[in-house]
Amino acid sequence: MIKRILTPVSIILVLLLSLGNASAKQTAPSFIRDAEIEHTLRAYARPLFRAAGLNGDDVEIYIINSTDLNAFVAGGQRLFMFRGLLERVETPGQLKGVIAHETGHIAGGHLARMQDALAKANVKSIVGMILGLAAMVAGGGEAGAAVVLGSQDAATKSFLSYSRTQESSADQAAITYLNRTGQSGRGMLEFLEIIGQGQYQPQTTISSYYRSHPVSSERVAALAQRVDKSPYKDTPPSEEDVIALKRMQGKLYGFTRPLPKTLKKYPVSDNSIEARYARAIGFFRYPDLPKAIKEIDSLIAENPSDPYFHELKAQALYENGDIMGALPSLETAITLAPNEPLILTFYGTVLNATGDVRDAERAIAVLNDSLAIDPNDGNTWDQLATAYSRTGDTGMLSMASAERSLLEGEYQKAIFHAKRAQDFFKIGSPSYLRLEDIITYANQASRKE
């Protein structure tokens, strides 16, 4: 299920590389969270992370709902990918090439001084820093400097601008990672051609990836030489990877475009999986639930063990008011994918929505299962707080609220809820000690701000 987190933080983040484009400041893009898309990206990335000597579980991947064609790393091992890039790539090799290249930046410690400064920061803090830097680049001057909190470090002004040397280094590392995983590097060359097409366009329309990742003829030649020497240069992508990319792109299109555009790109005459997927999403958002369910049921009939089709059916029903009808599909989805935290959180959300205390008790168990896998999802903590409220557990309600506020960077609220929760737990108990940690961290972070 795609979740669009409409917060000021989300809006700020996507402005960072508009670099003077005033119209970008009037939009309100957001983060995108989706179990299937994140699964696909991690399936592409995990072997490359391992090849680079990184622990894949330590690398966080964020998807930004912007049509900009870009990707970057920030704040330690955090990889940000724009929807525009995910939709623009034509092959799995091109997307894997981008991921491998950004992995090269992480492993190479490029922009290390800024990365050190942001390594322990939450996403909101990173976004605030990036906004200030973008304002400076766009001519914001003093206003930008104020957002950056008076930073004196000139290096911050090139936060997302890699040198040609770093770009070449990341390219060479990327080819090494692709070779170690038995994959072709041709996609990297193809992607450089795509972004290079904007080289001679007006400055305001040049791809932000091109601006922050400079392309030179020497860089392309060096990369082409490595690709040509690779024993895997002609290795085709797996059919599974091709299908996963098409599904991801169809899903993104259906969720981010109005139905007429979706039907134009994926007409009813197109019976491919990705086309039916996109149309189903477009129909239920329109809303035309009967047509959506017809498309989804056809996908489920052909792929009964696919958890994401069952998840989508539940989302279509839930968002069109059929709460009870959504539960069986979600139960099937979590049976098929018990370790997908976003599906577990969605299940807990629907259980909360029934208004039944017994369902709220079930939601508590499900949401705690989700947090055991991904403890850093504020929405899960929010739903857990709702479930505890329904069951009358004030102590756990306050604790969940403190955790959520801490994740969202609302430090004074985190302190308030944590202190309130301490009244319900024995001094020295694990829960009490966790609340102490929240208060200590929130106080420290608040002073830094």
Image (spheres, rainbow, N blue to C red):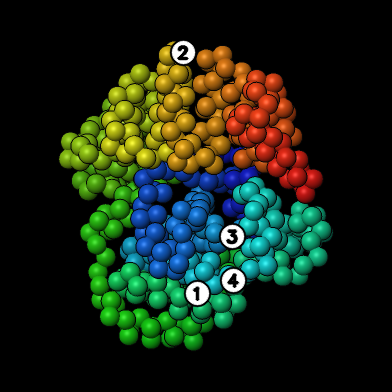
Discs 1, 3 touching: Cβ within 8 Å: no
Q: Earlier in the sequence, mark 4 or mark 2?
A: 4
Discs 4, 1 touching: Cβ within 8 Å: yes
Q: Earlier in the sequence, mark 4 or mark 3?
A: 3
Q: Earlier in the sequence, mark 1 or mark 3?
A: 3
Tag 1: residue type? Ala
Kindly report the distance in space between the C-alpha atoms of the residues bearing marks 1 and 3.
Answer: 16 Å
Which residue is pictured at 63% across the width and 68% down the height?
Answer: 112
Query: In terms of image quadrants, where is residue 436?
Result: top right
Answer left or right for 181 relative to 79: left
Query: In terms of image quadrants, where is residue 421?
Result: top right
- In the picture of the structure, the residue carrying the numbered disc 2 is 357
- In the picture of the structure, the residue carrying the numbered disc 4 is 110
- In the picture of the structure, the residue carrying the numbered disc 3 is 76
State the image coordinates of residue 93 (x, y, percent, origin top left).
34, 67
- In the picture of the structure, the residue carrying the numbered disc 1 is 170
State the image coordinates of residue 25 (x, y, percent, origin top left).
65, 51
Tag 3: residue type? Gly
* Mark 3: secondary structure: loop
Residue sitting nearer the eye, 92 or 211: 92
State the image coordinates of residue 416 (x, y, percent, origin top left).
73, 28
Kindly report the distance in space between the C-alpha atoms of the residues bearing marks 4 and 1.
Answer: 9 Å
> Label 2: how many residues lie within 10 Å, few (<14), some (14-19) or many (20+)?
some
Which residue is pictured at 51% across the width and 21% down the height?
Answer: 387
Q: Earlier in the sequence, mark 1 or mark 2?
A: 1
Q: Which mark is residue 263?
A: none
State the image coordinates of residue 379 (x, y, percent, origin top left).
53, 34
Which residue is pictured at 32% across the width and 85% down the height?
Answer: 229
